[in-house]
Image (cartoon, rainbow, N blue to C red):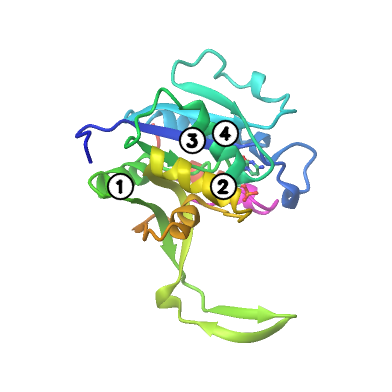
Amino acid sequence: MSNPHPAYWGVVPAAGVGKRMGADLPKQYLQIIGKPVLQHTLERLLSVTELSAVVVALGREDGYWPDLPFGEHPRILTAEGGKERADSVLSALDRLHGLAAADDWVLVHDAARLCITRADVRKLIETLRHDPVGGILALPSSDTLKGVENGLIVDTVDRNHVWRALTPQMFRYQALRSALREAAELGLTVTDEASALELKGETPRIVEGRPDNIKITRPEDLPLAAFYLEQQCYE
Ligand code: C5P
């Protein structure tokens, strides 16, 4: 890569409605130990001093963001989110146009993963900083996995070859932006950044993350996230 000192940028898609949560406000604004989910997530990312700034993609109708204490924050930028997660990420990357260099790194992190630790973000950065492509935090599967059709098991997947994709996912700015754009132009749904790079024939690297980096998805995840937040030693 031409630039020996690329910058690091955060991108947080936070424009989802969180249907599976069944709450009357988007899951990123539910309160956990006294703060909205998104505030926990952003405070943790901002504590990673390597990140020059974090772009948050917000829903067009989002009326909750102004209540969070980031309005004037020098390292927070906002962008308008899109229909799918990938559209929100692409919009955040467009916001970085003119700020990020082609081979700068972008770390995309789900708003709903509020238990992310600084140690895991740094592990990802340290492992991948000289990598040409990038990669993701992931977890090996401890359960046996089944392929299922119409409620019947049709296949048992070799769990030694299956990992669960977490975030952050870390890729070069230009490569990620063009991979997401191409996937959108082809009408392909990508649920994470790695898939977009995989469609381009790349083989992103796996970095083992911590199991407490859970994504708030269902109501029962809320007490679990509160437990993890309280257990993690965080100054
Ligand atoms: O729904 P799911 O948990 O997979 O969403 C992952 C992340 O993507 C969440 O942080 C959500 O707010 C975000 N998202 C988004 N724009 C969408 C859909 C989801 O920013 N259109």
The answer to whether residue 145 is above or below residue 201 is below
Q: Earlier in the sequence, mark 3 or mark 1?
A: 3
Q: Amino acid at mark 2?
A: Ala
The answer to whether residue 147 is above or below residue 213 is below
Q: Residue furthest top?
A: 72
- The answer, for residue 62, to whether it is visible in the render is yes
In the depicted view, which residue is nearer to us: 173 or 37? 173
Q: CA distance from mark 3 to mark 1?
A: 18 Å
In the displayed structure, does residue 216 sit left or right of residue 123? right
Q: Residue at x 57, y 16 (%)?
A: 71
Q: Residue at x 37, y 57 (%)?
A: 204
- The answer, for residue 39, to whether it is visible in the render is no
Q: CA distance from mark 4 to mark 1?
A: 27 Å
Q: CA distance from mark 4 to mark 3?
A: 10 Å
Q: Quadrant of residue 1?
A: top left
Mark toward the viewer: 2 or 3: 3
Mark toward the viewer: 3 or 1: 3
Q: Amino acid at mark 4?
A: Ser
Mark toward the viewer: 4 or 2: 4
Q: Earlier in the sequence, mark 4 or mark 2?
A: 4
Query: Do labels 2 and 3 touch, CB within 8 Å?
Result: no
Quarter of the rendered image showing ligand 1 = top right
Q: Amino acid at mark 3?
A: Val
2 in magenta: no
The answer to whether residue 10 is above or below residue 218 is above
In the displayed structure, does residue 178 sit left or right of residue 14? left
* Mark 4, residue position: 91
User: Magenta stretch?
Assistant: 212-225
| Tag 4 secondary structure | helix
| Tag 3 secondary structure | strand
